[in-house]
Image (cartoon, rainbow, N blue to C red):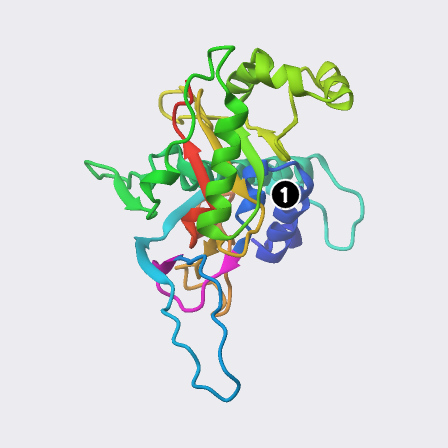
Amino acid sequence: MAVSLLLQPQSIMGLYERFASLTPSPLLGFFPDRPVVGRETTIQYDTITYTRDVAKLNVRGGRPNTVKPPARGTVVSMAINVSEETYLPARVVNDLRAPGSTTPGSADAELSRHILQLRKRIMALKTRMAAQALGTAAGNLSFTLPGAAAAETVSLNYRATHQTFGSGWNTSTTDILAQINAAKRLITKDAGKQATAMIMNSTTGAYLTKNDGIMDVLSPAAMDAYRQAGRIERLCNLDIIYIDDVEVNDDTEVETGIIPDAFVAIIAGDNSDRGMLECAPQSKHAPPSYRGIFFHVKEEMDINGGWFVQNQYDFLPMLACPDDVVYDASVT
């Protein structure tokens, strides 16, 4: 059976990218996609701790002063592999748009829904891993491979001082502003970057509106914004990003928040040391230079056979300068 032009891999990828305008989690904005050179599926990168030393003066014509290289650690992990497929029955394939036609049929919409579902699943996993990179898994990446008895745990080399900064936020008299400003100073001191955002869920954000010190210092404009939005959206020169996304387990249907209650992360806006590393697909059908999400279409060899739309994606969050994040798993 001849495959419809809409089932060609490049057309499927076009459908996938068409949904890129759908609002992804803001967390992914802190981890831009970065292709990995080579075809290995084990990723290794350096984590760097910069010093805050000042350059020393020298005499004209003198020998250059020696500067120690940045302190380094190493993160080594296998890439996280996703490979899923969705099935299109023959009745759907037969109703796909004919070559040269500009009028989409009902099957076109069904194909789009299949691709959208695949995209949502991948984005949910990327969002979970981005949240872990910001501290929701105790400063590690944690994932369980099929058939494994225990989870793989990959340390991201956070300093202990960057893994706690707040307490008592559920008490109205706690000086939350001082805790936030101390965390901002720590990022500047250790990473040489400016913190620009604070990440939490709405449950944790409610503590801010019940805090005496915070409500006392809100400007009239900030108070107006609070009245309109029902929450504080900027504090201590930080944009507050509320993440209330949930993920649902395929097997148990249990919902879990991407950002747990009482978790807060403060993060620098400079993404130069962060990213979502994308490896070459393992499929032999992928072009040698291809990186990112790869699609393949396979016909079911049966009298009533349809088509399988398959994807494959190997990736890993990278946090090369963990000092540009400060997080606390429980600010209460």
Judge left or right: residue 100 versus residue 121. Answer: right
Judge left or right: residue 142 versus residue 216. Answer: left
Q: Is residue 66 above or below residue 76?
A: below
Residue 315 visible to the viewer: no
In depth, the one of 105 and 83 nearer the eye is: 83
Mark 1 Cα shell of 10 Å, populated few (<14), some (14-19), many (≥20)? some
**Residue 223: quarter of image:** top right
Residue ID for mark 1: 94
Question: Which residues, given as a range, are shown in magenta?
Answer: 34-48
Task: Identify the residue at the far front of this view.
Answer: 59
- Label total for image: 1
Q: Is residue 31 above or below residue 280?
A: above
**Which residue is at a point 38% across and 76% down the rendered structure image?**
66
**Which residue is at a point 50% across and 82% down the rendered structure image?**
59
Tell me where residue 152 appears, x and y as whole percent: 26, 42
Q: Amino acid at mark 1?
A: Asn
In depth, the one of 186 and 284 nearer the eye is: 186
Mark 1 residue element: helix
Tell me where residue 184 appears, x and y as whole percent: 52, 39
